[in-house]
Amino acid sequence: GENVEQHPSTLSVQEGDSAVIKCTYSDSASNYFPWYKQELGKGPQLIIDIRSNVGEKKDQRIAVTLNKTAKHFSLHITETQPEDSAVYFCAASKNNNDMRFGAGTRLTVKP
Amino acid sequence: DAGVIQSPRHEVTEMGQEVTLRCKPISGHNSLFWYRQTMMRGLELLIYFNNNVPIDDSGMPEDRFSAKMPNASFSTLKIQPSEPRDSAVYFCASSFQVGNTEAFFGQGTRLTVV
């Protein structure tokens, strides 16, 4: 089955700096790669996603890149703010909706 | 829509007791997922259903765990008998099956087995 690895497990940045989280996946058939943000006491919420026919996608301060050949994808957050502090999860999924998550990255943005 | 609704939000039970977690997916969604979240293992997919049919239950830890989806608007995850190592947050999520789209998560059920 699919195996998703995520790094780093914790990340601390100064407000205004950029944050990058990286993930690799094992199943070349995976074609959908969402990123979720989880705040304390809540369920994960989608912040951005990318499909395998696209190499990069951007939404305001958030961008995701995908390298299908290397089977890795990354989340980039620019101009970080304290409210960006949360746990971020990457995931990979195939057409059968079998979505597997990475272990998560705890991001702390220091004011 | 109120989103994915899970109940109860918190459950404390004694070892050996039966525990039933409930989930109401978003209306119109035809895929439903049960995840377990722990510090040690992160978010683990336990089982998922497409059109009320279980597709993959390979993530279910052992025979003590069972899940059902009797109709499109309701699913249960049952643990019998419960053990302390089952303590975790259990999430239910739903999505549209076709097109591999976003999964919407409920608020989760925090289970503590003492």
Image (cartoon, rainbow, N blue to C red):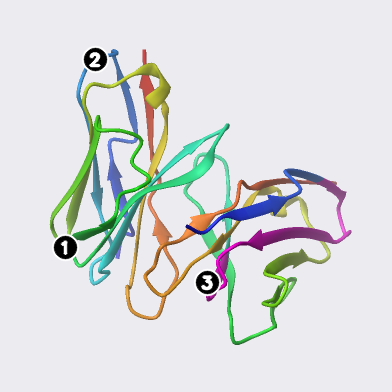
Q: Position of residue B9 (x, y in %)?
A: 34, 36
Q: Residues within 10 Å of mark 3 (few under 14, many from 20)?
A: many
Say which residue appears at 37% left-offset and 70% top-offset. A96
* Residue identified by numbered label 3: A30
Q: Quadrant of residue A98?
A: bottom left
* Residue identified by numbered label 1: B72
Spatial separation of the CA atoms under disc 3 and disc 2: 39 Å
Eye-nearest disc, 1 or 2: 2
Mark 3: amino acid? Ser
Q: Magenta part of the protein: which range? A: A12-34
User: Decide: marks 3, 1 in contact (CB < 8 A)?
Assistant: no
Eye-nearest disc, 3 or 2: 3
Indicate the secondary structure of the residue bearing disc 1.
loop
Say which residue appears at 24% left-offset and 33% top-offset. B63
Image quadrant occupied by the C terminus of chain B = top left
Q: Position of residue B36 (x, y in %)?
A: 42, 40
* Residue A5 shown left or right of residue A2 in the figure: right
Say which residue appears at 25% left-offset and 29% top-offset. B64
Considering every residue shown, the one lying at the far left of the view is: B70
